[in-house]
Image (cartoon, rainbow, N blue to C red):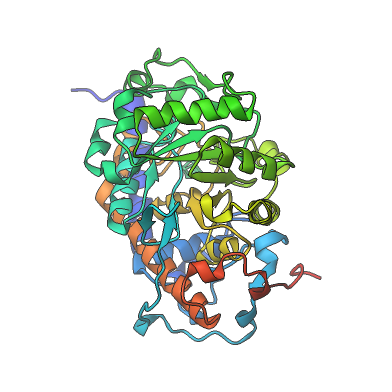
Amino acid sequence: MRVNALQKQRFQIQNKGLLFNKELSKIEVDSKRKKFSALGNRRWTRDLLLSTWYQSQHAKPPPVSSSLEYKVGESNGGFDNWRFNFENNTEESVWDDYNITRDLSITLNKKIKIDMPTYGGGMSYGSVSLSVMLARALSSKLANSYTSTGEGGYPIELEMYKNHVITQVATGLFGVNEKTLQNTPIIELKYAQGAKPGLGGHLLGDKNTVSVSNMRESVQSVSLFSPFPFHSVYSVEDHKSHVEWLKTINPKALISVKVATPHDIEMVAIGAYYAGADIIHIDGAYGGTGAAPEIAKKNIAMPLEYAIPIVHEYLTKEGVRDEITLIASGGVRTAYDVSKSIAIGADGVVRGSSELIPLGCTQCGNCESGRGCQVGIATTDEYLSQIIDPNWGSERISNLDQSWKLQYDYILSRLNLKNFKELRGNYEVLQNVGKKNE
Ligand code: SF4
């Protein structure tokens, strides 16, 4: 059979991606720093990308001798300017013989315990490939945690991991049906995303392939739009009806309500509580993939560093703090970011990009394009999708999980705390060290 020019081009891209992923597998940071000198940005710096790849391979943080910065970026604000009090001391390279002795679990609304303080955020079939969804689901199962379908439907291949898969219901209602709602321990009602509040979701026609359109019950190659907001919800009472609708379909599932972080986020949070939600998931600025417009990511929603304490304190003042779980997402990159989020009042964190970096994401920002992801993550192209092997991907995310667990235990031990419950809302353990260049 003759291979036409397009197929040739696809194979070349695919091979490049495979080679890149192979390269990641044997990355030894010190000798590769120069080679990757053009990587990264102020939030996901070259050091953070390289150190995440290192952790995904070695299941521990990079050695101190590598001088790689694996805790903070260079945004000159928020988490990047904060340090735990113990960080003034010289850090030893302790990882080779490190034993985890603390309880690193969190409990979602007194009902579901997960073995680490994070779970995976929604990434739809369409925004990422099925291989990526499978890699994330398998690693969630291994970690006794969760991943979320996003709003593109529930591929049948995920069913074997159904106890670890959250079904998302968003405004487009793509692929949402009774079976997928009954198949899950947690239903995520997505009202907005912190990366693009008020803008809804878009899947460009290029990514709407045959299988994606079948899953979404739409027409192939047509751009799809999930409007903002739910046009059936304009009050707490409407929201309550929504929650009751989902509880009627699946009475056992926890209901998580995902919202962006407007200036009155505490009112949104308390409204979610009175509507019957089990989890309030606040999604701050700086999250999202490269498909979210930069201007929206950086300028609309409130950053988590502001939003978390506002919600935590308001729920405490109202006497309901322990009746609803506060989960945060939006630009959380490291184990230190997770721990800082909890120290300012969150119960746990949802991860997004930090689960894609282990798979080779370089934060290049081409996610909206059907064939623009050179490493086969944000694609639905049948050739590019093959670049990621789900078992390889799962292993790399699991290795990162293990490395983060070592760091959680280390942070808690240096603060003389037994668990994350003791860290929650414990502002005094943090200090602002100011801008790097001041
Ligand atoms: S490598 Fe680029 S296109 Fe692929 S997921 Fe990462 S940011 Fe998106």
Q: Residue furthest right?
A: 438
Name the residue rendered at 50%, 80% in the picture. 64
Name the residue rendered at 50%, 18% in the picture. 223
Q: Residue furthest front?
A: 319
Q: What percent of the width, then of the height, locates residue 175?
A: 37, 23
Q: What percent of the width, then of the height, locates residue 431?
A: 70, 73
Name the residue rendered at 59%, 27% in the picture. 237
Q: Nearer the viewer, residue 366 or 254?
A: 254
Whether residue 222 is visible here, answered yes or no, is yes
Looking at the image, residue 122 lies above or below residue 24? above
Q: Residue furthest left?
A: 1
Quadrant for the C terminus in the image: bottom right
Q: What percent of the width, then of the height, locates residue 217?
A: 37, 16
Name the residue rendered at 49%, 68% in the picture. 420
Quadrant for the N terminus in the image: top left
Q: Nearer the viewer, residue 266 or 210?
A: 266
Q: Quadrant of residue 41?
A: bottom right
Looking at the image, residue 27 lies above or below residue 255? below
Looking at the image, residue 121 lies above or below residue 305? above
Looking at the image, residue 432 lies above or below residue 348? below
Q: Quadrant of residue 239?
A: top right
Q: What percent of the width, then of the height, locates residue 158?
A: 27, 38
Q: Is residue 417 left or right of residue 399?
A: right
